[in-house]
Amino acid sequence: MKSKLPIRNILIVRMSSMGDVIHQWPAVTDLARAYPDAAIDWVVEEGFAELPRLHPAVRRVIPVALRRWRKSLLADQTHQQWAQFKTDLRACRYDLVLDAQGLIKSAAIAKCTCGPVAGFDRHSIREPLASLAYDRKYAVSKSLHAIERNRRLSASALNYQFEGGIDYGLKVPDLALPWLPETPYAVCLTATSRADKEWSEANWIVLGQKMLALGVRPIFPWGSPNERARAERLAAALPAAIVAPKLSLTEAAALLAQARIVVGVDTGLVHLAAAVAVPTVAIFCASDPELTGIRASGYAVNLGQRGAAPSVDTVWSAVQAGWRE
């Protein structure tokens, strides 16, 4: 049996993207079980700051604004905000700082802290130069799923053994969403960061028609004006479908958690759906799900692969097999 380290304060550096942040949650659950008295803080991009707060083991979230600051590097406001960020970062002496992102920028942030820094070794990391910043380095195979890699890195760095299935450990807030229908609904996540990852609108319409025929109303969330326009086009073709209002990530989590099922393309919100334990079907059109597909302890199905999108019939079969009655 491994001997635990004397740990009181831990900092995780995992800034983006949404899916990567979500993939860190099971490792946080493991860590909290191994060190139930430790305080866990988390550095994350400001746009995703709501996500770490959904995990009850996280004490403090420290937002960073690298994406925004790099657009105005010479501005006085940027310098002031960077100085305040470093002050917040150094407000606590950490027994371990874990760079779970493995990039030069995340390693640079980790080195600004007060405490020893750990991360992947140069053969395991996304950007090998980042490993030069670490005091402790660990080998974790790149062939593993991102969630497994995170769990193994955390266990190695903090000298504990993890076991059992994936547990995101979330506490989803019971928010009132007054615009939600009283009838059963399914969330359809049609928006993604790249056009080649999209599933055709014609497919979404056929899928929505099948849902409506069984009394389940499709809901289409969106994040940008273009995504809203797509959602409105789809809803116009599907009487009784709903275009969601603009949602925060916390509201999105509450919406997903109450659905009969979530169907989505390769996007951060489909990983959030799997994390909040709703039955989820993920559609892959331009990427492969082996290393970054959805994983959950409940119903979570990955369909399609790079260059081979799944058919409507394939998706519908997965929906019928998994949705809540």
Image: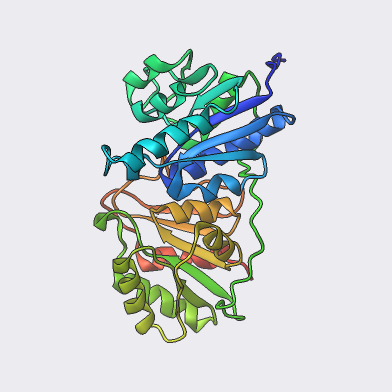
Q: Quadrant of the N terminus?
A: top right
Rendered location of residue 89, percent (x, y): 51, 30
Tell me where residue 239 sits by quadrant.
bottom left
What residue appears at the point 57 percent right and 47 percent down from the top-left corner? 296
Q: Answer yes or no: is residue 145 visible.
A: no
Tell me where residue 143 sits by quadrant.
top left
Rendered location of residue 266, percent (x, y): 38, 53
What residue appears at the point 68 percent right and 20 percent down from the top-left corner? 7
Rendered location of residue 188, percent (x, y): 44, 67
Q: Quadrant of the C terminus?
A: bottom right
Residue 121's place in the image compared with 292, above or below, is above
User: Which of 185 and 306 lies nearest the eye of the viewer?
Assistant: 185
User: Which of 222 and 290 lies nearest the eye of the viewer?
Assistant: 222
In this view, the residue farthest toward the bottom is 239
Residue 271's place in the image compared with 73, above or below, is below
**Count of numbered marks:** 0
What residue appears at the point 33 percent right and 67 percent down from the top-left corner? 227
What residue appears at the point 33 percent right and 25 percent down from the top-left corner? 127
Rendered location of residue 100, percent (x, y): 47, 30
Q: Answer yes or no: is residue 35 visible.
A: yes
Residue 144's place in the image compared with 124, above or below, is below
Tell me where residue 111 sits by quadrant.
top left
